[in-house]
Image (cartoon, rainbow, N blue to C red):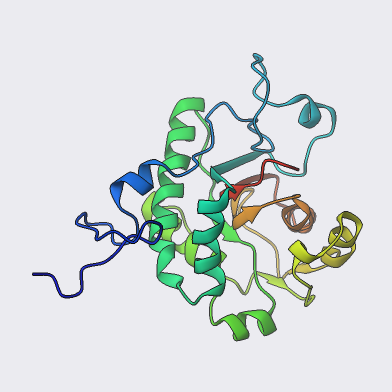
């Protein structure tokens, strides 16, 4: 008899598999994003021969590729909120495993080049002190180990503006809120990086981060995230 047998985070059934967070059925039924999504923004696109959607062809975002594992539906929202706000940092093991698998699949399918290093969206020191950890850092660290890509330390790319939560802002408020939020300390020795975050919604946070990194000499930025909202 297993006294401390783990239970699935979604259906609460006992788990017998080696992965202690989700049962096999719930893991299989997660809202995985289609591999035919736009390579630039990660959103579903019409069935065309182009790899990018018309919006991204017309107005290019300041990054080159976006790879997301899932769409931000209720099941995914619940797991990520547990990860970020309910003191469940151990969920980074699940998310880094799933996202690493997705990244490897995209690289093989589309013959993408691997980045020279991985970096992540930093938290302001006040928010990180309150939460106790940066979920994007934990995720990036796991991906770095699984894909064997170097991780750039948090001292090199920091958040200098204590912003309000983006989810609470209007569209205009999101842009103003995140403006000039990031800072780079010293030059980069790499030109191609992957920027890791948990969720991409309107894209304002990663847009501002990419502009800051590009101004510091980064020439090619890939976005890697757990989830992408379908409404941009």
- Which part of the image, by quadrant, shows the C terminus? top right
Answer left or right for 30 relative to 1. right
Answer left or right for 51 relative to 103. right
Q: Residue 44 in the image: x percent, y percent? A: 64, 30
Q: Is residue 200 above or below residue 86?
A: above
Q: Nearer the viewer, residue 3 or 215?
A: 3
Q: Nearer the viewer, residue 161 or 48?
A: 48
Q: Is residue 67 above or below residue 140?
A: above
Answer left or right for 229 relative to 106. right
Q: Quadrant of residue 153?
A: bottom right
Q: Nearer the viewer, residue 228 or 217?
A: 228
Q: Quadrant of residue 56?
A: top right
Q: Residue 171 in the image: x percent, y percent? A: 87, 54
Q: Is residue 169 visible?
A: yes
Q: Residue 174 in the image: x percent, y percent? A: 84, 60
Q: Residue 102 in the image: x percent, y percent? A: 45, 41
Q: Is residue 137 visible?
A: no
- Identify which residue is drawn at 66% across, 80% down: 127
Residue at the top extreme? 49
Q: Is residue 158 above or below residue 22?
A: below
- Which part of the image, by quadrant, shows the N terminus? bottom left
- Identify which residue is drawn at 41% across, 57% down: 10
Residue at the left extreme? 1
- Identify which residue is drawn at 79% across, 27% down: 57
Q: Nearer the viewer, residue 96 or 26?
A: 26
**Total numbered labels placed on residues in the image:** 0
């Amino acid at each position: 008899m297993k006294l401390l047998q783990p239970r699935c985070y979604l259906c609460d059934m006992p788990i017998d598999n080696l992965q202690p967070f989700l049962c096999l059925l719930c893991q299989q039924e997660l809202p995985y994003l289609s591999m035919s999504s736009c390579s630039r923004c990660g959103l579903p696109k019409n069935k065309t021969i182009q790899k990018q959607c018309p919006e991204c062809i017309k107005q290019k975002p300041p990054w080159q590729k976006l790879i997301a594992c899932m769409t931000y539906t209720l099941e995914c929202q619940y797991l990520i909120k547990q990860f970020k706000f309910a003191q469940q940092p151990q969920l980074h093991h699940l998310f880094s495993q799933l996202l690493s698998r997705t990244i490897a699949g995209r690289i093989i399918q589309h013959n993408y080049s691997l980045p020279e290093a991985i970096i992540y969206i930093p938290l302001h020191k006040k928010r990180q002190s309150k939460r106790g950890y940066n979920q994007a850092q934990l995720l990036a660290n796991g991906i770095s180990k699984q894909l064997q890509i170097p991780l750039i330390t948090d001292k090199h790319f920091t958040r200098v503006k204590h912003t309000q939560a983006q989810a609470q802002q209007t569209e205009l408020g999101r842009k103003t809120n995140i403006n000039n939020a990031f800072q780079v300390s010293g030059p980069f020795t790499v030109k191609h990086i992957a920027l890791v975050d948990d969720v991409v919604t309107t894209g304002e946070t990663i847009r501002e981060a990419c502009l800051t990194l590009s101004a510091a000499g980064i020439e090619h930025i890939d976005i890697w995230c757990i989830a992408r909202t379908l409404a941009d």
